[in-house]
Amino acid sequence: MKKLIVLGLLGIIGWMPFRAEAQVSISLNIGSQPLWGPVGYDYVDNYYLPDIECYYNVPRRQFIYLDNSRWIYSSSLPSRYRGYDLYSGYKVVVNSRDPYRHFERDRVSYARYRNVRNQRVIRYSDDSRYYVIKGHPHGRSYGRGRDRDDRDHGNWRGRDRDDDRRGGYGRGRDRDDDRGHGRGDRDNGKGHGRGHGRGRD
């Protein structure tokens, strides 16, 4: 009987590190989030963009939009959204594998965030967690050129922090202002302290 108890305990102890490792590997994807994504999230599957009624899949780095009754995955937005500014538009975190399955619900629920322009984005955050993202002003130097997330997808107007300082676009935001954002995560599916996110479906 003692041998069974000892073997059982050894089995449980041996299994625990694998489970912990698996949880860590799937619960963080900060380095995959784009510079124009909102601050306050350790894990994100998708963003819903209420201004243009489409999604962005973070792991695949692709937009998901409706075209002729079909959902299209693409690395860029369609030409009809060419002038859309990803940095200023509001993004809602939607942790769901196929977010478009709930499009009608998202469209109604998040309509109140259309034309909202006060959401803090990763590029202007001084939170050191985001320094690992390629192109972050406080992160490692990757050269002066634009990075993968800042390529002209026909939807980024080329704004950067220097433009704001020179008055070129005059956002009027304080880069050091990171208030009101908790940490959203995959397990609880909560937003950034205001209930704007949705858990996994």
Image (spheres, helix red, strand yellow):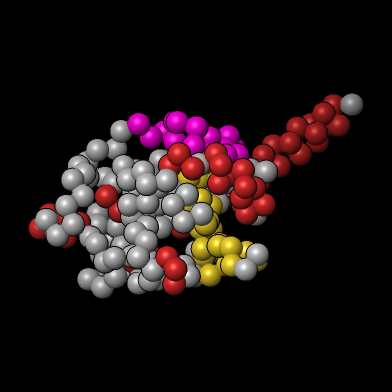
Quadrant of the rendered structure where residue 167 is? Answer: bottom left
> Main SS of the magenta segment?
loop
Residue at the top extreme, as displayed:
1
Q: Quadrant of the N terminus?
A: top right
In this rendering, does residue 135 appear at all? yes
* In magenta segment, residue 183: yes
Q: Is residue 154 above or below residue 42?
A: below
Near-viewer residue (12 or 56): 56
Image coordinates for residue 152, horizontal then vertical, percent: 35, 72
> Horizontal placement of 41 versus 171: left or right?
right
* In magenta segment, residue 201: no
Q: How many marks?
A: 0
Near-viewer residue (99 or 187): 99
Near-viewer residue (174 or 107): 107
Q: Which residues are magenta?
A: 180-199
Q: Quadrant of the C terminus?
A: top right
Image coordinates for residue 183, horizontal then vertical, percent: 44, 36
Quadrant of the rendered structure where residue 27 is? Answer: top right
Image coordinates for residue 21, horizontal then vertical, percent: 60, 47
Q: Is residue 27 above or below residue 72?
A: above
> Which residue is drawn at the image coordinates 45% and 31% (left, top)?
194
Near-viewer residue (54 or 160): 54
> Which residue is drawn at the image coordinates 58% and 63% (left, top)?
66
Residue at the right extreme, as displayed:
1
> Which residue is drawn at the image coordinates 35% and 65% (left, top)?
83
> Which residue is drawn at the image coordinates 42% and 46% (left, top)?
114
